[in-house]
Amino acid sequence: MKFKSVFDIIGPIMIGPSSSHTAGAARIGRVARSLFGRKPEWAHISFYGSFAKTYRGHGTDVAIVGGILDFDTFDERISDSLNIAKQEKIKIKMSEEEALTDHPNTARIRLGDKDGELEVVGISIGGGKIEIIEMNGFELGLSGNHPALLVVHNDHYGAIAGVANLLAKHQINIGHMEVGRKEIGSEALMTIEVDQNIGDDVLKDIEKLPHIIKATRIHE
Amino acid sequence: MFRNVSELVELSISKNVPISEVMIEQEMEVTGRSKETVMELMEKNLDVMEKAVERGIREGVKSHSGLTGGDAVLLQKYIESGKSLAGTTVLDAVSKAVATNEVNAAMGTICATPTAGSAGVVPGTLFALRDKLNPTREQMVRYLFTSGAFGFVVANNASISGAAGGCQAEVGSATGMAAAAIVELAGGTPEQSAEAMAIALKNMLGLVCDPVAGLVEVPCVKRNAIGASIAITAADMSLAGITSRIPCDEVIDAMYKIGQTMPTALKETAQGGLAATPTGRELEAKIYGVPLKKK
């Protein structure tokens, strides 16, 4: 069953007008911000498909920047996010892409500052639900049906075991897991789908483990 | 866990509890949350719906595109004039559904039920019936759980997305959900809720998703309006003892299959239907500031 909670049906509380083009866009922006882990100095956003055609009318641009500012779907500051970004000195660049994507509502976000860069590709699948399908060039195979955990880490022995052990300690069951790296010893990514919701305490504990750079959750 | 409407109704009867209670208990089981928390979370949704309705019927909000806004206020004034033909409750529900969708189109805060584009029907009917039936706050929260229970079945067996199933999946689902919840609020049985949902959804089958300029405005706002009136009528029919010859689950399945065979041009792509009319195209060109494409 794709929908598990009554709050998938009655909810989310959100700024209009579209659960897919506004709330979903805000959530994609917020996951990018959360994975980047800090306020970026610049953000480059590319819209594809239906996002590219209708982003102004739906406030997809405003919503995605709101997400990058770490606003939730119901945060009323979303409607003023372009100004707020300017005040916070975040340089925003947006482009409409012609390329065809598998999903009509696709956005690519690059965030950066002097210490680094991050790139994610997200899709908005309806009712405010989203999936992150790519991160820093890693393809993510998330079903979107379960809460998921993304862990950026150094490609080093013990990193994966450490996270798995910690989840076991918190009695969180892993339903699906993928690991990938660009090359031996470089940055790597764990994508873990779990059966229970992941609390802030678990994320903090994971980040304290050796070789872990950043941990974020995506689905609630 | 119930998978379809007949299981939902059976659970409600065998446990001797209303459908809202079946949904609440399932939510507690799936999320591990307490009853108190689950009820509180839903009450937050109710608060947001109430604020949006109030804002829409008082302020007459306008969307950025200028396509929608102000109609909820017009309807409220018309009701006050005492000339309404459909009756106060139906028209009040219509105006409050419109109010919610006007606030949504103006980038205001709403609660998706089940989506943002179809967010008007459930709260519109609820806040109109509040004046008629004087429910407690808890009964109003339960109304949302009952709507949610039926929406849950549709989402898992068919679709609640216009891009996947057309408007029948969005406003159609919302209308069926509201009809079922109205029955419970008015003191009807679980079976009558299912009949109301079936009657309401049958009258939304085949409805396409053809928004002008791809925006959640035209015709979405007015489809929520008429959805609210259908929901109340279907609930009344069911409470009068009328049943649907086709069971609710089969109506949902028919909706799913119609959605699958519906052309892509009529599923939230702004390529067909009202979006492709001369006026629809003209409005689109005006909004995006681009010249009309020659056909």
Image (spheres, grey):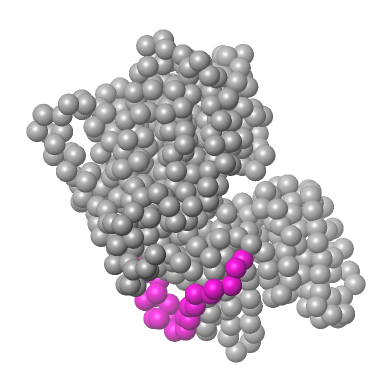
Q: Position of residue B228 (x, y in %)?
A: 34, 33
Residue B237 inside the magenta-drawn segment: no
The image position of residue A27, as x and y in percent, is 54, 61
At x 28%, y 36%, the residue is B94
Whether residue B161 is visible to the viewer of this picture, yes or no, is no
Q: Position of residue B39 (x, y in %)?
A: 49, 36
Q: Quadrant of the N terminus of chain A?
A: top right
> Image height check: is B51 above or below A97?
above
Residue B259 located left or right of residue B172: right
In the displayed orientation, state which residue is furthest to the front: B295
- In the rendered image, the vertical position of residue B31 relative to residue A172, given as above or below: above
Which quarter of the figure has residue B290?
A: bottom left
Q: Is residue B52 left or right of residue B37?
A: left
Q: In percent of the image, x 50 and y 62: which residue is there?
A: A50
Q: In the figure, is residue B275 to the left or right of B173?
A: left
Which residue is at the far bottom? Answer: A114
- Residue span colored magenta: A79-101
Residue that extends furthest to the right in the rendered view of this protein: A157
- Residue A149 quadrant: bottom right
Q: Nearer the viewer, residue A110 or A6?
A: A110
